[in-house]
Amino acid sequence: MVIPLKNLIFPFSAIIGQKNAKKALILNAINPSIGGVLIKGYKGTGKTTAVRALADLLPPIKTVKGCSFNCDPDKPDSLCGECRSGKIQVVENDMRVVELPLGSTEDRVVGSINIEKALKEGSKTLEPGILAEANRNILYIDEINLLDDNLVDVLLDAAAYGVNIVEREGVSITHPSHFILVGTMNPAEGELRQQLSDRIGLHVFAKNIIDVDDRIKIMKRREEFENNPSEFIEKFKDAQKEIRDRIIQARQILKEVTISQRLMRVIARLCINMGVDGHRADIAILKTSKTIAAYHNRRTVTENDVLEAAELVLGERFENQEEMEGEVEKAAAETAKEADEELDKENQPLDPEDTGNEVDEDCEAQEEDGGVEGVPHEIYWEEGDEYNQTPTTGDALEVGTPYEGGKPVEATEEVVDIQKFLKVENEKKQRIYGKRVASKTIKGRYIKSKLPKEVSNDIAIDATLRAAALGSKGNIKVEMEDIRHKMRKHDAKASIALIVDISGSMFFEGKVNRIKGILYRIMENINRHQDKISVIGFKGDEAEIIIPTTRRAFSFKDQLDNLTVGGTTPLASGLKKGFDILVKEKLQDEYIPLMIIFTDGMPNVGFNKKFSSLSNKYLHDLGFPIELDNSPVEDAIRIAENLKDKEINTLVVNFGKEELGHEFNMDLSKVSGGRYYDLQDLINPETVVTKILDYERSQL
C-alpha cells in the first residue's frame, strides 16, 4: 500500500510543548487577516515540524475549478481576468502549506512565461509562480531571515496590496495574492529585515524544552512515527479532528464576536505604553483577541483574551510572563482611571460665567480626559499629544540622547561619533554598495536580453521569439542563432575578508574575550545585510582560514567558540590569504571586496618565518644597522601595496596601546589606500564596530 505524502506529515496534535507556536498557527488558520506568524527558535526546536503539520488541520475552501490562482468565487472583485471572462464552476479544495525555498529565483516566485508553449506554439502564456499557488493558502518560508532582498521586496509588494503583478517577456498579468505568511528562523543567523517583520502579525519564540519527561515523550513519539507512520497517524486521528472542527466552528462565529470599548482602550493604552510604532500592533491584538474568543466558542472578548493576544503580538518586548501581565494590568488600571475622570467631568456642573473664550486649566483638563465634546479625538489631540512632543528650547541634544520630561537623560548606550575614531581617510570613490549591478547567476531582476556567450538555461523568451519571428515565414521556428539570454541585476553586496589578530600580544593584554564579542556582533551585522564573509586568524608561523567565504557565517559558530589565542603574529600571511580571496571576488565582479584588519599592529613573523620584532624597523629608522629585507613589516607593507593596486577597500582597526603598533597600523592603512580607526581607549567597542561597518557600507 502506497501512503500519500501528506499523510506522512507528523500530526500537529502529537507535538509536545511549543504552546505559543501552535496557538499562533491555529489562530491564523481561523483568521488569516491576523497577518501571519514569525516563529523564532534555535535548531531542532520543532519550528518546521509544527508548520508542516498544520496542513492536515486546514479546512477546505471554495475555489474556481481549474483556476491557477485559487480565486474565491464568493468575491467577484478579486477574480483573475480568466475567471471574470467566462462561466465558472465552484469546487472545494483543501488549504495547503506552500513552501518558498531560499534558492528560488524571482521568476519562480512571481511567475514567468511558459517556455514549452512559447517554443512549440509561439504563444506567450504565463507560468504561475509560488505567489499564485499561495493565494488563499499558507506561504511558508524556512530561514526567512536569509531570503534574498529582491524576493523580500516582492513579498512586501504582494502583502501590501494583496495582488501580484507579473510583467514578464511582454506579458502583463495581475492576480490576487492573499496568503498567510509563516516564517521560521534561527535568531543566531541574523535578524529579519524590519519592513517584512512589521508585516507579520504574531511573533513567537520556540524555546528549548527542558522538562525531562517531555523530552522522553518527544523521543518516543518520533521513534514510533518513523517505525510505523500510518499507525501513529491513526492514533492521533481523533485529536486532529477535534482541532480541525474547532477551527471550522471558530471561523463560522468569528464575525459575531464583539469587544467592549473599554478593552479596546486597554489595547491602545498598552501599545502606547510599550512605545509601539504605528498601529499594526493595535489592530493585530484586536483581531487576535477576537479570534481567541471564537476558538473558545465565545462571542465576547475577555481581558484574558487581550492578555493572550498581547503575548503573541508583543511577546518579544517582554522579558517574562509576569512583566507582560503587569503591563496589561497597568493599561487596564489607566483605562479605568480615565473612565472615572471622564465620568466625573460629565457630572461636574458648568460655570455660568465661563464664556469659553479663554484657554484655562479646565480646558487643559479636558485635553487630558480625551477631548472636547463634539470634536473628534484624533483632531483635538493632533498638536497636544504628549507622546509626539519634541524639545524646542534649551540646549541642543546630542544625537542618540533620550529626551524625557524636558531634560536630557543619560543614554543607555554610548553615543557613537564615527569621525571621533577615524584617524586616516582615503580618497573618495564612486559608491556602488546597494545599487543595481549585473548578476552572474540566474538570481536578480531581469533587465534586458543579450546575445549568449556561453550555454545557459536562463533564456529570454520574448527576445528569442522576436529574433525568431524576423527569420521565419508562417509559423515561428526558433533556431540556435535566435536564442537570447537574460541580463539580470541585483543589489550590490560586500564580500568581507576579516583578518583577526589572535596572537600572544593580544592575549596578554586581555583582549581575547573582547575580540570574540566583536566577531559575534560582526556576524550578526553581516547576516542582516546579507554580505559574504571569510575569517582569517593566525596559527603558529602562518595564517589559517577559520571561516571560508560564506553568506551563512553562523553555520561556523563552533569555530569561533573554539578560537585559540597565543603565539606569533604572521600578519603578512593573513593579509596574503585575505588578498587572494578578495582578488577572486573582484574578478567575478559581483561583490564589492572589503578587507578589515583587527590588530594591535605588532607583526613579528614574515614569509621567511623568522621571528623579528617590530621595534627593529624603528631602530633602523634611527640609523641602527639592522637588516630589514623580508622582515615581517616589509612583507605586510608589500601586501598592503597590492591591496591598493587591485583597488581593494581596506580598513585597519587598532586595539593596541603600544605607540609602535599605532604607528605601524597608520602606515598600513596609508599604503593600502584604506582607512584607519583607533579604538584602543574604548571600553565597549562592540557597538562602535558595527556602527563603523554600517558607515563604511555607505562609502563603498
Image (cartoon, grey):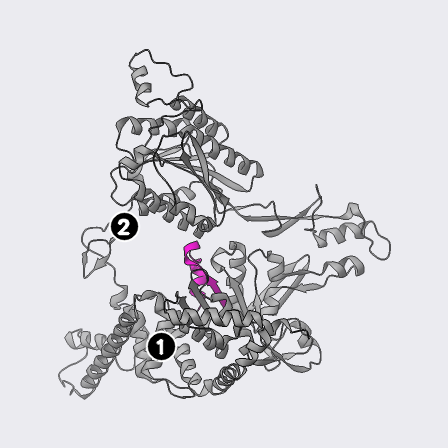
Residue 54: x and y in percent read 52, 74
Q: Mark 2 highlights which residue?
A: 399
Magenta-tinted stretch = 178-200
182 within the magenta span: yes
How many numbered badges does the structure rendering display?
2
Q: CA distance from mark 2 to mark 1?
A: 37 Å
Image-quadrant location for residue 618: top left
Q: Amino acid at mark 2?
A: Val
Q: Point out the image quarter for the C terminus.
A: top left
- Residue 658 placement, left or right of 358: right
**Residue 619 location (% of width, % of height):** 29, 17
121 shown above or below 610: below
Q: Label 1: state its secondary structure.
A: helix
Q: In the displayed structure, does residue 16 sit left or right of residue 63?
A: left
Residue at 84% from the left image edge and 57% from the top image edge = 475
Residue position for label 1: 308
What is the x, y in percent for residue 59?
56, 80
Judge whether residue 179 can be spotted in this image: no
Of residue 177 and residue 341, the one placed in the foreground of this image is: 177
Q: Which quadrant would the N terminus be assigned to in this image?
A: bottom right
Q: Please give left or right for residue 21 compared with residue 383 in the image.
A: right
Q: Which mark is residue 475?
A: none
Which residue is rendered at x = 57% and y = 80% of the image? Answer: 234
- Identify whether 302 is placed above or below 668: below
Query: Residue at left 72%, top 51%?
Result: 463
